[in-house]
Image (spheres, rainbow, N blue to C red):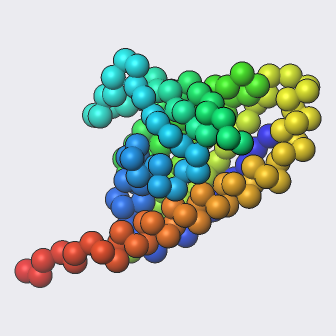
């Protein structure tokens, strides 16, 4: 199952990228995200191949998902793969710079472990899309607020 989403954000690309890349800032817009840990350390310069574990609170319970960074081209692209018991998800955040505006294109490919999980995934598809829309709306608000607070560049 593929889910796509497009969002125009009135903020420079570097601010939007920072909200996608910074673990603490991700907690501000990603509902339920509690922690992101790097068992083998985090390579800040070239994180492709970096393994991480995210703990996400869902329906009152903490769930852990193993992940790996699959693509990383700052400030334009971050792709990760997350693995749960019932599914694998490939997520891509692609940013396009338009000066003081940024286009965010989100793509999520869900691969379910079997027919039962595919049926459950289909039944909860609407809920999944609502959660995504809420998260993207929150990300937009936070990035736009940060852009307003940022000092303008010095005049020459």
Where residue 126 sits: x, y (%)?
82, 54
Residue 48 vs residue 150, the one in the foreground: 150
**Residue at 69% across / 54% down in the picture?**
131
**Residue at position x 12%, y 77% in the image:** 154
The count of marks equals: 0
User: In the visual, does 43 lie left or right of 87?
Assistant: left
Q: Is residue 98 visible?
A: no
- Please state if 124 lies on the left or on the right of 68 as rendered: right
- Outermost residue on the left side: it is 156
State whether residue 155 is above or below residue 109.
below
Q: Position of residue 21 (x, y in %)?
A: 40, 46
The residue lying furthest to the front in this view is 60
Q: Against 147, is 69 above or below?
A: above
Kindly tell me whether residue 139 is visible in this rendering: yes
Quadrant assignment, res 72: top left
> Up-down: is 16 above or below 84?
below
């Amino acid at each position: 199952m593929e889910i796509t989403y497009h969002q125009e954000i009135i903020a420079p690309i570097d601010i939007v990228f920072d909200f996608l890349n910074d673990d603490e800032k991700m907690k501000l817009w990603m509902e339920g995200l509690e922690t992101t840990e790097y068992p083998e350390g985090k390579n800040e310069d070239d994180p492709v191949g970096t393994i991480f574990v995210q703990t996400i609170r869902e329906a009152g319970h903490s769930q852990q998902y193993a992940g790996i960074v699959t693509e990383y081209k700052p400030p334009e692209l971050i792709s990760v793969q997350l693995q749960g018991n019932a599914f694998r998800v490939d997520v891509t955040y692609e940013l396009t710079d338009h000066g003081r505006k940024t286009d965010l294109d989100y793509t999520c490919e869900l691969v379910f472990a079997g027919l039962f999980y595919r049926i459950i995934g289909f039944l909860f598809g609407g809920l999944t899309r609502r959660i995504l829309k809420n998260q993207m709306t929150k990300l937009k608000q936070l990035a736009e607020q940060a852009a307003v607070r940022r000092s303008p560049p010095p005049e020459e």
